[in-house]
Amino acid sequence: MILDEEENNKKGTRLKLWLKRIGFVGFLFFLIKGLVWLALAYFIVK
């Protein structure tokens, strides 16, 4: 029983780590995408 609980905790920790990584990567993706669109609009208007 104790081993099952420990393994579940490890899986939960790994899942949380992956979610944090995906969240950070997603944030960077949309930040860069937004900046590219702003630069594109700037150069089209200019």
Image: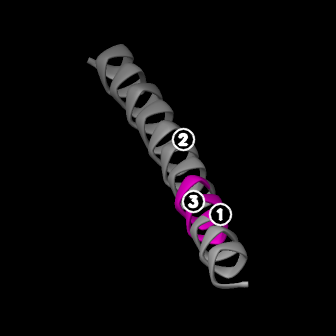
Q: Residue at x 37, y 15 (%)?
A: 3
Q: Earlier in the sequence, mark 2 or mark 1?
A: 2
Q: Secondary structure at mark 3?
A: helix
What is the distance, in whole Å, between disc 2 and disc 1 at their CAs? 29 Å
Quadrant hosting residue 12? top left
The dominant secondary structure in magenta is helix
Q: Tell me which residue sits at (72%, 74%) in the image.
A: 43
Where is residue 9 shown, x and y percent of the image?
41, 33
The location of residue 16, given as percent across then percent down, is: 45, 44
The residue where tag 2 is placed is: 17
- What residue is pinned by disc 1? 36
- Say what amino acid the circle numbered 3 marks: Lys
Provide residue 21's location: percent of width, then percent of height.
57, 44
User: How many numbered discs, if any?
Assistant: 3
Calculate the distance from the C-alpha at mark 3 to the C-alpha at mark 2. Answer: 24 Å
Q: Secondary structure at mark 1?
A: helix
